[in-house]
Image (tube, grey):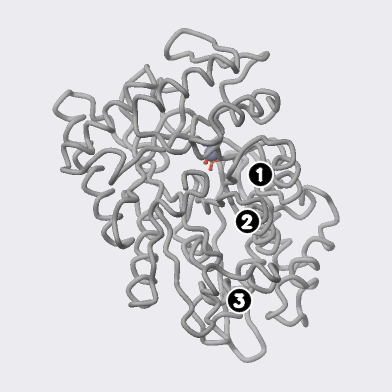
Amino acid sequence: MALEDGSSGTAKVPAGASTGSREARELRDGDPSRYGGRGVQKAVAHVEGELARAVVGLPAEDQEAVDRALREADGTRDKSRLGANAIVGVSLAVARAQAASAGTPLHRHLAGLFARTAPGEGAPDGGAAGGPGGRVRLPVPLMNVVNGGSHAPNRLDFQEFMLVPWGFPTFAEALRAGVEVYHALGRLLSEYGLAAGVGDEGGFAPPFSRNLEAVEVLVWAIERAGYRPGDEVALALDPAASVFYRDGRYVLAGEGRALDSGELVDLYEDWASRHPIVSIEDGLAEDDREGWRELARRLGRRLQLVGDDLFVTDPELVRRGAEDGLANAVLVKVNQVGTLSEALATIRTARRFGWAAIVSHRSGETDDTTIADLAVGAGCGQIKAGAPARGERVAKYNRLLAIEREAGPTAEFPGRDAFAVLQ
Ligand code: PGA
Ligand code: ZN
């Protein structure tokens, strides 16, 4: 993406494995002779053709106008005609080009956009938007260090078991704790002959079949690394329950049992009472709204309950979810909704309801680091970017380290304060 003044920006687009059914649609070629049907020549042709024609001549500083033009060029509700993968790439490249043109770090440019789209609510703590004395709010990393579900070839039904290193004064120290626990975990697994490589998001993929084993081994690894479970390093889960929901029941194939939603909520309640679990994402399936209501009623004051497949980064679905009392936090994946402006609107909607918003990677990632800047720019306070392993995950953490260092004394790390519901 090139601007008139010669500035340019590029973006790379991720893809998910456990996608929500209401996500914006990515366009794949479907030609089995190339990349097993997963090629993207059509999407690329749309970037270079219809989408380029739609945005050429627009002012790059008006991201909303750019994103509107992209949506109108596509013309479908789910962005399936030109492809959400094509659209989101253009949307993000425009933001990067504009930041370059203004000579502004991307997170500051995004903070400015966020403040503009959220009149009166502003950027975090008086404006990471670069106002005088503006703070730069780093996120607590939710680090997925045991992979199961659609992300690993083991028998774990739950998809993600995450570390939440929150009891530290800076992002750098939190990240260090996460890295040390990750390596302690690796050593523990080897000692027990359970090391089995890593899954899609860089977490270990041990041959456990009981989901609780993963939780127990994480607590053990936190202690082995010399940290206090809970106070310093807590845990988060993303069961991605839509994937194992069949005919109204949650089928835990690895454990040889099927639960109804009430029983699965019982399980979460029991685990959270015995282990330092502070956040559960997609604890129930996207179509089980009654179940979500029960989950929120029973645990919503004690745990962060995050909708991913449930809300697919759609501001309207978040609004309805908040009014129906389904959750208290939303996962934000820009490619799930298809444009930067819509993702910012989702974060704004979450904030309006007092919800947390967690900026997230996808299981299929690139080395693009935009989500690091987005988490900071919109002051989300939490990011989900995988294990500290595999270059495409580490790239996000390295970017956050650089942002924190550049911000110097204006940087702040919210720790537990980022978890609205736990205050
Ligand atoms: P996905 O999974 O990128 O494979 O959809 C990530 C998640 O469920 O959070
Ligand atoms: Zn998820």
The residue at label 2 has a CB less than 8 Å from ligand 2:
no
Give the quadrant of the N terminus: bottom right
Residue 284 to residue 55: above or below = above
- Amino acid type for the residue under numbered disc 1: Val
Locate residue 286: give its quadrant: top right
- Vertical placement of residue 114 versus 60, above or below: above
Q: Relative to residue 39, is residue 409 drawn left or right?
A: left
Q: Is residue 135 above or below residue 131?
A: above
The residue lying at 23 percent from left, 43 percent from top is 181
- The answer to the question of whether label 3 and label 2 lie on touching residues, with beta carbons closer than 8 A, is no
**Which three-letter amino acid code belongs to the residue tagged 3?**
Gly
- Give the residue at mark 3: 112
Q: Specify whether 165 is left or right of 63.
A: left
Give coordinates of residue 163: x percent, y percent. Answer: 35, 42
Q: CA distance from mark 3 to mark 2?
A: 16 Å
Q: Residue at x 29, y 34 (%)?
A: 197
Disc 3 secondary structure class? helix
Determine which residue is flagged by label 2: 351
CA gap between label 3 and label 1 equals 24 Å
Q: Which residue is mark 1?
A: 312
Graded by Cα atoms within 10 Å as few (under 14), some (14 to 19) or many (20 or more), the crowding at tag 1 reads many
